Image: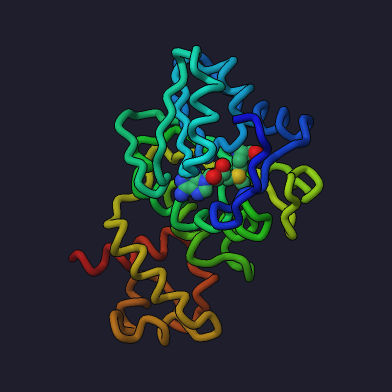
């Protein structure tokens, strides 16, 4: 059980080894007693060892058959820890105010964030380590090049906050890219919209970024309808706000 496991690329395994980075992430998350916490991909428990001290309801979600038995042994005596041997993409949260933390496997980070978006009514906040480029895209303000599908969808439901950058040296094995910590806090009253319809619309709108919004949406909305929604038909997709995309989506309901 104690022999060293080789990191698995298919599970995006880069294990944190820099204690100062680990402490900064835990401080940013600030776990408290009484909270229900889910950690995605605990791995060798770099973050978990700290979380277990602060949380009385800690859920670990790990897919790797080799890591799960080690976690079971390590936390055998901890009654506050539940281990879910599960693909995090299948997670369904049951309680409100769930808090989530994770040094996410980069290969599934986008579908995972979308899955959590669909469950945002159950989520209080999330602190994640992601590829730096992905954090920039999520948090990008309207009008800049990085603002795209992921920005609109996640900013619809969450306040997005860029925290600190983590260099490759903090991990074993070292990834080829910089990572960054992000905090996503659920907005209390996001505008009403059919989320799958918004997602489909935004995909269409950003289909060809260099074209105008009128062109990208020509199969589904007329120039006059855009004008009626106070949207310039000649605008590029990255210049429309989240509310503009919500308004277009809601105009189909009428
Ligand atoms: N938290 C550890 C750390 O910071 O050192 C490990 C982070 S490592 C980047 C990602 C972890 O997620 C690995 O333990 C990996 O096995 C796990 N993982 C990968 N895909 C997963 C999935 N679909 N569901 C749950 N866990 C997954």
The vertical placement of 206 against 7, above or below, is below
Q: Is residue 78 left or right of residue 87?
A: right
Near-viewer residue (29 or 44): 44
The vertical placement of 192 against 250, above or below, is above
- From the top left corner, tell me how far across and down residue 234 is, in percent: 48, 84
The reply to whether residue 133 is in sight is yes
- From the top left corner, tell me how far across and down residue 75 is, in percent: 52, 20
The vertical placement of 49 against 61, above or below, is above
Q: Is residue 228 left or right of residue 99?
A: left
The vertical placement of 153 against 61, above or below, is below
In the rendered view of the protein, which quadrant contains the C terminus? Answer: bottom left
Give me the residue at 47% from left, 31% from top: 60
Q: Is residue 168 left or right of residue 157?
A: right
- From the top left corner, tell me how far across and down residue 3 is, in percent: 66, 35
Give me the residue at 41% from left, 83% from top: 216
The reply to whether residue 183 is in sight is no
- From the top left corner, tell me how far across and down residue 187 is, in percent: 44, 40
Give me the residue at 66% from left, 60% from top: 133
């Amino acid at each position: 059980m104690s022999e060293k496991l080789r990191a698995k690329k298919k599970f995006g395994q880069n294990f944190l080894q820099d204690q100062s980075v680990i402490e900064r992430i835990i401080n940013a998350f600030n776990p408290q007693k009484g909270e229900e916490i889910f950690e995605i991909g605990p791995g060798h428990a770099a973050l978990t060892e700290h979380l277990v001290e602060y949380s009385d309801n800690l859920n670990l979600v790990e897919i790797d058959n080799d890591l799960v038995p080690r976690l079971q042994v390590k936390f055998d005596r901890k009654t506050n820890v539940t281990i879910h041997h599960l693909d995090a993409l299948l997670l369904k949260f049951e309680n409100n105010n769930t808090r989530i933390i994770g040094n996410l496997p980069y290969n599934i980070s986008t579908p995972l964030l979308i899955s959590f978006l669909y469950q945002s009514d159950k989520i209080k906040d999330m602190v994640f380590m992601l590829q730096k480029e992905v954090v920039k895209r999520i948090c990008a303000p309207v009008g800049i090049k990085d603002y795209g599908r992921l920005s609109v969808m996640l900013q619809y439901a969450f306040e997005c906050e860029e925290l600190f950058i983590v260099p490759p040296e903090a991990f074993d094995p070292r990834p080829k890219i910089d990572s960054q910590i992000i905090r996503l806090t659920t907005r209390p009253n996001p505008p009403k919209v059919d989320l799958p319809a918004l997602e489909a619309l935004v995909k269409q709108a950003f289909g060809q970024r260099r074209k105008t919004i009128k062109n990208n949406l020509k199969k589904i909305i007329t120039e006059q309808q855009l004008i009626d929604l106070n949207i310039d038909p000649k605008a590029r997709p990255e210049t429309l706000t989240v509310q503009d995309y919500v308004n277009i989506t809601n105009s189909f309901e009428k």
